[in-house]
Image (cartoon, grey):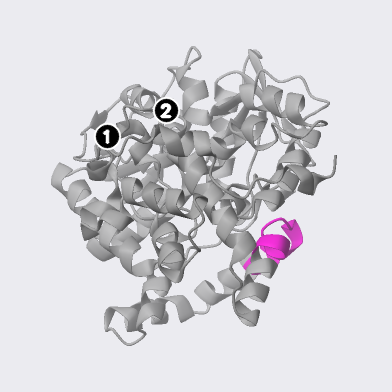
Amino acid sequence: MAASEFVTYNPRQVDLDRCVHCGLCLNACPTYRELGVEMDSPRGRIFQMIQVAEGAPITPSYVEHIGLCLACRGCESACPSGVPYGRMVEAARAEIEATVRRGWLAERVRRYLYGCVIPSRTLLAAAGTLLYLYEASGLRALARAASRMKLLGRLGSLAQLAPSAEPPFFFDHIGRTFPPLAERRYRVAFLSGCVSNVLFARLNDATVRVLQANGCEVAIPAGQGCCGALHMHAGLREDARKLARRNIDALSSGEFDAIISNAAGCGSTLKEYGELLAEDPVYAAKAAQFASRMKDVTEFLAGVELNRQMGRVEATVTYQDSCHLAHGQKVRGAPRQLLAAVPGLEFREMPAADICCGSAGVYNIEHSDMSQRLLARKMEAVNSTGAWIVATANPGCLLQLRAGVRLHGSGQKAMHVVEILDLAYRSYR
């Protein structure tokens, strides 16, 4: 069977039929909370999906409403009927991708970004080098200063979000195996992602160290690459399937107690490889087995006997739930449990911790106005706690929160939960 024979381009009727339009999802939806527009709620978007399924044309309005969704899946946690909204909106975007034609330039840029840059270590490293030079030259600081004076318009918002590249990049570690720091208890595979190898290389380093400190032999498989999460969110489902097969092949020869990701958005997609490739006669069983071993790093560490030999971290911390960890993977307690294990750390729960911060993959670039509105509200919640550290469990959220601290904060530090654990282990005497 050719790959194209099992590509699904529209939401399943059985999923559409599960929504009873009760409205309990409304308050969980960030765009509805901001706009109060029914068509920008999960219920309203499902109503529009049903209309398209019944033969209505895909209009610019439909594309706009589906595109404005963050795919945060907060509605799934609120829904009493178990509507699988995440896969429905991804299917709707795949249907739009197969039907709607963009302008020539937009299409070429999109295909180059998703088809060439993101899957390529060489091109990502080149982009990271350019980003590093952009920062080192002082141009980034200049652009941010200009944006604060409202001189750059929408480009100013993007300048505020521009991340830092972190050389040396993590690509050099791919293909290596790191021994445990004490007796080996587990053998795990670490999937380091795609852009994280450039933008969050030190987070990846910290993840390996924390796993080593907890008795793990950490293998970083050579053939791994992008998980396909960004492609799924963009409606490029067949591209995501190709990337999934690549990662499954990369781990096919290894015996691992768990496959680890430190990126909640990636982990959510990795755990759904079984569903993504369910109709692939060659990969269906292998994908299901792969998905069954996937763990978020916080989920894994909270499920083992944690190494308690940590130094004190004298700080107050609050925690921002990553949407795809809380709503996609249903992991909420593990990050908080790990933070509670750090000596000296005082935890303060923030209001509405599981409402999206506005990052959502590349959403903060494509819909920067809405993203900035959500970020401002999130920082109000952060500031209300008085915490010095705002922690999260997803690199994309971390990038957004760092921008939030610059724009709306009071000098807080945004950190991944694993970075806090790493700090505690490294300060142990």
Q: Is residue 250 visible?
A: yes
Q: Quadrant of residue 17?
A: top left
- Label 2 sits on residue: 330
Q: Position of residue 195 (x, y in %)?
A: 60, 55
In screen coordinates, is 311 left or right of 200?
Answer: left
Which is nearer the N-term, disc 2 or disc 1? 1
Position of residue 4 relative to residue 258, above or below, is below
Range of magenta residues: 114-127
The quarter in which the N terminus is drawn is top right
Q: Who's the residue at 43% across and 53% down the image? A: 51
Q: Position of residue 21 (x, y in %)?
A: 30, 39
- Name of the residue lying farthest toward the front: 55
Question: Which amino acid is tagged 1?
Answer: Glu
Disc sitting over residue 314 in the figure: 1
Q: Who's the residue at 42% across and 72% down the image? A: 158
Q: Position of residue 63 (x, y in %)?
A: 46, 64
Position of residue 120 relative to residue 344, above or below, is below
